[in-house]
Image (cartoon, helix red, strand yellow):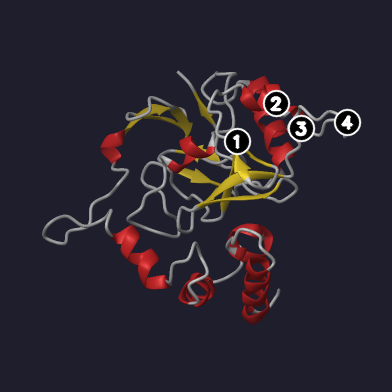
Amino acid sequence: MPSLARMCFRWIESITLGRPPRSLWEQEAAITDSLEREDVMRIEHGILALGLIAGFGMTDVAMARDAHCEDGVGQRNATTPDSDFVRLGNGMVQHRPSGLQWAQCAIGQGVAGSTCTGSALIFSWDQARQAVERLNRTGELGGYTDWRLPTVKELTQLVEKCREAPSINTTIFPNTPWTGFWTSTLHYDGRNRLDNHDPEHVDVDAKSGAHPDDNDEDRIRPSEAWFVGFYKGFEYPYDIASAYRVRVVRNP
């Protein structure tokens, strides 16, 4: 396992080379799942203290998040309370504000009463899409066959801003790993976020990872897609060959 110093160096290296900063515990799921929470926090706090993330230092980032979590008398409030969700049974919940239906467990986990058991599997972006297709072929999740990867906008609606590690309502989504979860949103040309929230846009424009011929200039050539990291709930673009987890969603 890389030392904490080496991981911090790779963090700084990625920033100085002009790539968007990303947390290493989300980039390297296989490594960081074995790290202690305190080790991860030391990495994060060291980097944030340098003021390198979006121009903010650690205090600025913490204050911005805490503003969502305190009322007039300093009491912390959930941003995704239980009342925002309807339990549908069979491992599914409905998000009242958006109307979307979500799997309570990540792909690879199983539903056992009110919890999720087993380990959430990790996939490249292409493999994630294939895993969703397999899920739909079997109809094993509620009997539905129209599950899909969420867009980055949809997945960030589940982020609980008043907690971390994981930054999600763990009553509704129990045993959620606090690493990255893929979205269907592509990072076009390494610069622009492709925020077409039509659920079919990935199938039309990025089938099987969107690797068109080099002379096809009108098609998307993504090398990166967005994921949401549930340690702090931030979203980042990263290489589609990277390994993250999957929580599926559907439109009722």
Q: Which residue is mark 2?
A: 205
Q: Which residue is mark 3?
A: 210
Instruction: State how far apart marks 3 and 1 are (Cα).
Output: 13 Å
> Residue sitting at 49 percent across and 69 percent down?
37
Left or right? Give the position of 183 relative to 233: right
Q: How many marks?
A: 4
Q: Answer yes or no: is residue 104 visible.
A: no
In the displayed structure, would residue 242 be above or below residue 216?
A: below
Instruction: State how far apart marks 1 and 2 are (Cα).
Output: 11 Å
Q: Which residue is mark 4?
A: 215
In the displayed structure, would residue 239 be above or below residue 152?
A: below
Q: Which residue is mark 1?
A: 194
Mark 3 or mark 4, whichever is nearer to me: 4
What amino acid type should be assigned to the residue bearing mark 1? Leu
Q: Quadrant of the C terminus?
A: top left
Q: Secondary structure at mark 3?
A: loop
| Image coordinates for residue 35, horizontal then vertical, percent | 58, 70
Q: Quadrant of residue 94?
A: top left
Left or right? Give the position of 147 relative to 87: right
Left or right? Give the position of 149 relative to 239: left
Q: Secondary structure at mark 1?
A: loop
In the displayed structure, would residue 3 be above or below residue 210?
A: below
Look at the numbered discs 3 and 4 and tell me whether their residues touch, using CB distance below 8 Å: no
Mark with earlier residue (4, 1): 1
Q: Quadrant of the N terminus?
A: bottom right
Mark with earlier residue (3, 4): 3
Instruction: State how far apart marks 3 and 4 are (Cα).
Output: 14 Å
Pick out the residue farthest to the left.
73
Look at the numbered discs 1 and 2 and tell me whether their residues touch, using CB distance below 8 Å: yes
Instruction: State how far apart marks 4 and 2 are (Cα).
Output: 16 Å
What amino acid type should be assigned to the residue bearing mark 3? Ala
Mark with earlier residue (3, 1): 1
